[in-house]
Image (spheres, grey):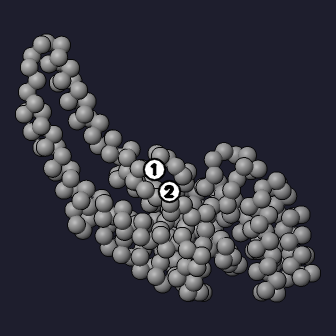
Amino acid sequence: MDEVYAHWRYAKEHVWESYEDCQPFKDMGQAAAAVASEQNLSKDDFADQLYLIQEAYSSFLHGTNFGSDSSTWRHWHNRFPTARLGKKFGEPYLSSEMLSSAAAEYLKAGMRIPKFDRSLLDALIAQELFAFIDTRAGRSAFATQFGCFGFIIVVVLGWQFLTGETINWNRVMIGLAIFLVPWGLFYLWPRRGLLKLYLAMRDAYHLLSGSVVSVPELRRAVEVARDKGVAWPPELYAVLDDVEARTRRL
């Protein structure tokens, strides 16, 4: 216990003193101190490893939190209930650039922290899933895809109202059908339709919502989604390889 306290005290005094008002850094510092004690790391070794972990975790927190005020930062947690097609655009906030940096920096360190392993995998999958909903398959993407066509319909109907011409509803319905049928096939195509891609990504993310995660099962779900056409970030595979080499569950 004394060794754990010594490691934690070092982390607080020498590495994270500028983030002393940030609870996630304190929690991760305690987790790192516990791992360092289990591995019997010397003070110098712990200092080197802790610096790398701090850099990685700083990028991670920047990638999952709005704003620069560290007192408002929160540690990322699974958002599976939010992963629906009708979610609010841009929520939750996730930066692919910062998460990629966090993964690269974390893999450079020799120390591994289970809490960080799981959160990093969760955020990397969530980032791709929520970005896919926002840009291609969700409510906001639906509005974008129909925006131009809807504008044309409004102009046509407005012109007919202003000129007093009779609205030809048959033409309007035919025009809608010409647009909707190809889009529906594109959205619902059995193998690579947008809905199938979304469901495959959601199935993979659902595995991370439990209290214990099977790493081999998570990899299978990720690969199934990849085979359907999902372009996961390359850092996800690198972190999965690293975790799977050490353990079969998170």
Q: Residue at x 58, y 79 (%)?
A: 212
Residue 178 occupies quadrant: top left
Disc 2 is placed on an element classified as helix
The percent position of residue 183, horizontal first and vertical second, equals 21, 50
The answer to which of marks 1 and 2 sits earlier in the sequence is: 2
In the image, taking residue 216 as reference, residue 53 lies left or right, namely right
**Residue identifier under label 1:** 87
In the image, taking residue 156 as reference, residue 73 lies left or right, namely right
Quadrant where the image shows the C terminus = bottom right
Indicate whether 128 appears above or below 88.
below
For label 1, count other residues whose C-alpha is less than 10 Å away and answer few (under 14), some (14-19) or many (20+). Answer: some
**Residue identifier under label 2:** 82
Quadrant where the image shows the N terminus = bottom right
Indicate whether 112 appears above or below 137.
below
Under mark 1, the amino acid is Lys
User: Gap between marks 1 and 2, in whole Å?
Assistant: 7 Å
Residue 36 occupies quadrant: bottom right
Indicate whether 179 appears above or below 163.
below
The percent position of residue 57, horizontal first and vertical second, equals 68, 63
Q: Residue at x 14, y 19 (%)?
A: 160
The percent position of residue 23, horizontal first and vertical second, equals 77, 59
Q: Are marks 1 and 2 in contact (CB under 8 Å)?
A: yes
